[in-house]
Image (tube, rainbow, N blue to C red):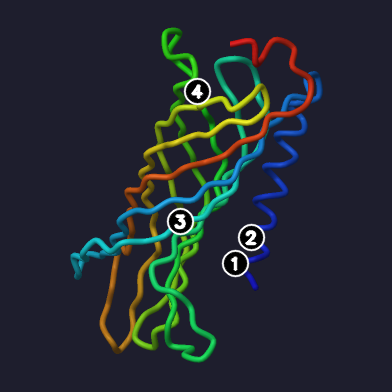
Amino acid sequence: MRHLSKVVGFVAGMCLIVSAIAQADRTWWASGELGAGDFKLHSDQVTGTREPVFGLGFAGGHRLNDKARIGLHVKGWLVEAYDLNYPAQGESVTNVMGVVDVFPLRAWERFFMRGGLGLSIYSVNRATAVGGKGLVWEGAVGYEIPLNEKFFLSPAVEYSEGRLGDVLNHVGPATNRRFSVIGFKMGASYHFGSRKGVWNR
């Protein structure tokens, strides 16, 4: 419950920031995404191996101009599927981040680069494992493919890395726990609100 309240507070704070910036121009975007990647969990004591994961995410925010937009990105990576009939099964990472997308190239005007920073929550149901939370960052590159003036497909490659804290118990210490994910995703986005030349690219 403490983790949930922190995530809700973070989301609310990001919404207030975006709302304040967007007073003069009601130009918005929202997206959903599916992806697959390689997940690695390791610490000072254990070097982990990469495992295949499935990703699901949502993002949205304000388009500042034709070169940049800001928003909130909520992304989950499923490492092991949860099973109600087997409570010791299930492992996932959830990231909640503020993001900035930049469109830096005039020749490839729909190519974008993303940077993000926020909170990561690691959940695991195995009796010998311990969950955690900490700071996470992500970087991604992608390209918007227009279907019409409002809808876009956005293939992208993403890398994220986060800290999960230390575990000190009788089972065995695990200090400087961290994870990384390299993934490919396909997103679909919708742009709405005042245009003011933002989509005249």
Measure the alpha-carbon separation of dots 4 and 2. Answer: 28 Å
Tell me which amino acid carries mark 1. His
Q: Where is residue 169 in the image (x, y as percent from the top left)?
A: 33, 84
The answer to the question of whether label 4 and label 3 lie on touching residues, with beta carbons closer than 8 A, is: no
Q: Where is residue 183 in the image (x, y as percent from the top left)?
A: 35, 48
What number is the disc on residue 102? 4
Q: Position of residue 154 (x, y in %)?
A: 49, 34
Residue sitting nearer the eye, 42 or 176: 42
At label 4, counting other C-alpha atoms closer than 10 Å, the crowd grade (few under 14, some 14-19, many 20 or more) is some
The answer to the question of whether label 2 and label 3 lie on touching residues, with beta carbons closer than 8 A, is: no
Image position of 145 with respect to 163: above or below: above
Q: Decide which of tag 1 and tag 3 comes sooner along the chain.
A: 1
Quarter residue 30 falls in: top right
Measure the alpha-carbon separation of dots 2 and 3. Answer: 22 Å
Q: Decide which of tag 4 and tag 2 comes sooner along the chain.
A: 2
Q: Name the residue under label 2.
A: 6
Task: Label 2, secondary structure: give it.
Answer: helix
Tell me which amino acid carries mark 4. Val
Task: Label 1, secondary structure: give it.
Answer: helix
The answer to the question of whether label 1 and label 2 lie on touching residues, with beta carbons closer than 8 A, is: yes
Residue occupying image coordinates x 37% and y 45%: 184
What number is the disc on residue 55? 3
The answer to the question of whether label 1 and label 3 lie on touching residues, with beta carbons closer than 8 A, is: no
Image position of 142 with respect to 180: above or below: above
Task: Label 3, secondary structure: give it.
Answer: strand
1 vs 4, front mark: 4
Q: Mark 1 points at which residue?
A: 3
